[in-house]
Every structure is written in C-alpha cells, then in structure tokens.
Amino acid sequence: MSDIIPMERIEQHILLIRGQKVMLDNDLAELYGVATKVLVQAIKRNLERFPEDFMFQLNYQEVAILRSQFVTSRLHGGRRYLPYAFTEQGVAMLSSVLNSKRAVHVNIEIMRAFVRLREILATHKELAHKLNELESKYDDQFKIVFEAIRRLMLPQQLRRRSVH
C-alpha cells in the first residue's frame, strides 16, 4: 500500500489547525478512494465513535484561511457543510467505520506519517534548545543568523499550513 500512496502524499495532507495536527475529510476520502459524501455519511452513522478530540468541524474563518493559503476552492467547493478535521485518533477510528481492506492499509500509512511528523518535531525541539544555548553565548551580531536558522528548522508543511 505504501507503493500506492507515498508517505510524502499523506504528509502533504496533515495540517495544523487549532494547535492540532489534523487531516480534512475530503483529503481522507481521496486517500481511501471514496467520495467525501460517503465518508461523512459513515461518520454520521457512528458519531459516538468521534468525540471532539477525535474530530471537529471547521468554522467559516478557518475555511477562508485555508482557501486563501491554497488559492483554491476545493476545500469547500460545492459542499453544503463545513469540512471536518480529524486528529490522529479520529483517523485511527475511521478504519473501523469504513470496513474495507483499503481503509485499514491507508490508516496504517497515515499513522506512520503522524509518527514520522512527531519524530521530526521532537528533533527540531532538541535543535531549538541547542540553538538557544549557542545564542546565549554570542552577542547580537549573530542574532540574524540564529533567526534564519530557526525559520529553516520549521517543517515546510507546518510553515505554510498553520491556521490560527
């Protein structure tokens, strides 16, 4: 399955919204090979499996910010409702709702992507700590260099895809 869905493709769909790493319903539906409408219907039939820390619905402001970041209307398009965002736990729960081999395999790859992103962020925290230590040893003439290094340390998808 990782041959069918490259890790990079999955990672591109992980967004930072409300301070949480999430994936949107339309992106998940695309990865699972189902229509977004089918995915949402399966979720609505099993709402008790998706508490707020597993899934939440975006508000109009968040959709507008995402749309402006991607310069596309594909996030809301012809939909009659606001998109749903799924945390890592919500994505894990989806495989039990969709009941297909593809859903299970896709979920495994998505879980690996979330773990990899968490590892990358942990590495960056360690680097940030070491950078702070170095910065305290040098004077202001190196301030610009340290700021540039900090910007480069941010994962590219989080730099572009953070919604506040």
Image (tube, rainbow, N blue to C red):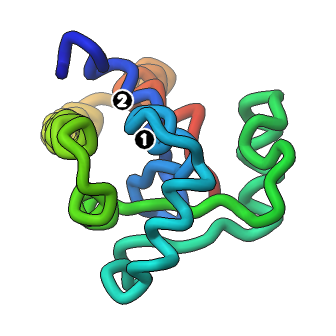
Residue 16 picture location, percent across and down: 48, 51
User: In the rendered view, does 129 fall on the left or right side of 38?
Assistant: left
Number of numbered discs on residues? 2
- Asked if disc 1 and disc 2 are in contact, CB closer than 8 Å, the reply is yes
Which residue is more in the foreground, 121 or 10? 10
Q: In front: mark 1 or mark 2? A: 2
Q: Is residue 132 above or below residue 139?
A: below
In this view, the residue farthest toward the top is 3
Q: Which mark is residue 86?
A: none
Residue 113 picture location, percent across and down: 23, 35
Residue 28 picture location, percent across and down: 45, 43
Residue receiving disc 2: 10
Q: Is residue 132 visible?
A: no
Q: Is residue 57 visible?
A: yes
In this view, the residue farthest toward the bottom is 48
Residue receiving disc 1: 14
Q: Which of the 4 image quarters holds residue 80?
A: bottom right
Residue 73 picture location, percent across and down: 83, 36
> Label 1 amino acid?
Ile
Q: CA distance from mark 1 to mark 2?
A: 7 Å
Dot 1, crowdedness within 10 Å: few (<14), some or many (≥20)?
many
Q: Which of the 4 image quarters holds residue 142?
A: top left
Q: Is residue 50 above or below residue 33?
A: below
- Residue placed at 86% from the left, 47% from the top? 78
- Residue placed at 53% from the left, 52% from the top? 25
User: In the rendered view, does 164 fall on the left or right side of 62?
Assistant: left
- Residue placed at 50% from the left, 23% from the top? 144
Classify mark 2: helix, strand or loop: helix
Dot 2, crowdedness within 10 Å: few (<14), some or many (≥20)?
many
